[in-house]
Image (tube, rainbow, N blue to C red):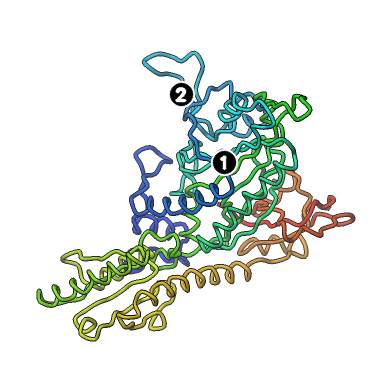
Amino acid sequence: MTSQGVTPQSEDYARWYTDVVQKADLADYAPVRGCMIIKPYGYELWENIQGALDRRFKATGHKNAYFPLLIPMSFIHKEAEHIEGFAPELAVVTHGGGKELEEPLVVRPTSETMIGHAFAEWIQSYRDLPLLINQWANVVRWEMRPRLFLRTTEFLWQEGHTAHATKEEAQEETMRMLDTYADFAINEAAIPVIKGLKSTQEKFAGADDSYSIEAMMGNKWALQSGTSHNLGQNFSKAFDIKFLDENNDLQYCFTTSWGVSTRMVGGIVMAHGDDKGLRLPPRLAPIQVVVIPIFKTDEQKNLVLETIGGVRESLITAGVRIHVDDREGLTPGFKFNDWEMRGVPLRMEIGPRDVKAATVVLVRRDVSGVEGKQSVQATELVSTVTRLLDEIQANMLAQATAFRDVNLHEAASYDDLKEIVKDGWALIPHCGTPECEDRIKAETKASSRCFPLDLNEEWYPKGVTCSACGKPAQGRAYFARAY
């Protein structure tokens, strides 16, 4: 272990991840197996994720609403593929108010059925379309192999649900929201993602087509970081979501759903973290700058804290999220390590000499050693801090992109795939069948991540066969170990 008690990534990556989540004060285990307690620092990070996504949703015309947590079991059964896909994960309430319920209630695993019921009531005419709704909520899916943020029985998310008059409009919405997720991941979370179509095996239960953004973590495993589903008319027919078109004919709507969850927090930890702990992208970091006062005497303390007060006000005015660590009884060295663990992008050190020279010391979290440390004149502090935060954001994206790209490989054969997925992602011509994917997973532990959109735009699979089974290829797909 490191001096902070974090298992090195090279020794045990899974243990490193859990150590960092707990020691950085993001989350803790709950008394109920599979559940977690999100601590204030972790929840602030989630709030910043929420804010960045919510702004994007509203800019594209979506409105927030809220739907019930409890769903009648009969709703779940209305869409056959949906119940088949979710049955093993359902939590069911059978008793309430001291007696057995007439109909069991499912604790929300997702809201297509409940929202489908509401849409059927709300939509009458083509004038009611498109209907663009988003919900911020919690969901419950019984989890057998829990891991903080990545897989928990209860987790937080947003789920968008929309209804459209035509198949083309629904597809356009599906892709718009996929692009929205990719824009967020790249520009806010500094995580490069691959947009792609999921295979039949991996698509959402009840969807015509599912798309995802796939991210590479620090151990080269994949994390599905957001999904967008074209549900066709499957839920409309199950819930009788109809509208009168311009010719006064009754038509079924085309619907979509899309979501990002608190597993994005885990993705940020694993995409950027190192053996010192978290490294948070400035745009999402709860604290962008932490100030460490350095002094030995009460006189020095008063002088330093007075100076810090002015620095704090000027940075708050500039829109910087700043925190002054004035905890008593802790050495500056302890505080340095503590805030490195929490991933604060920029550390500021101010001591008596700095006050006298009208300077401060700034230390970047993304650059190790003396290269990440500089002394700045107080008159240039605000401009320097804002510039450095932008540079850190860009550098973290560049680092993550370079890491990903060097670990993406095109497999020449199935044997080649077997070797690549031990420590990277393999791209192959793939048939997309469940049987083939089951075999690949059994033999390599790798699953189909997606058919990347940018690598399949001009793909003509005629005559090209799957590298794994020899059947006609649907396109090129990435395979990797995944969370």
Disc 1 marks a residue whose amino acid type is Gly
Determine whether, in the image, residue 192 is placed left or right of residue 467.
left
Mark 1 highlights which residue? 160
Question: Which is more toward the observer, 295 or 98?
Answer: 295
44 is higher (above) or lower (below) than 357: above
Q: Outermost residue, bottom direction? A: 357
Mark 2 highlights which residue? 93
Question: Which is more toward the observer, 366 or 24?
Answer: 366
Q: Earlier in the sequence, mark 1 or mark 2?
A: 2
Residue 117: image location, x then y, percent: 59, 25
Mark sitting on residue 422: none
* Dot 1: element: strand
Marks 1/2: CA distance? 25 Å
Residue at the (24%, 86%) spot, across then down: 357
Residue 229: image location, x then y, percent: 65, 42
64 is higher (above) or lower (below) than 247: below
Disc 2 marks a residue whose amino acid type is Val
Q: Quadrant of residue 253?
A: top right
Determine whether, in the image, residue 183 is placed left or right of residue 136.
right
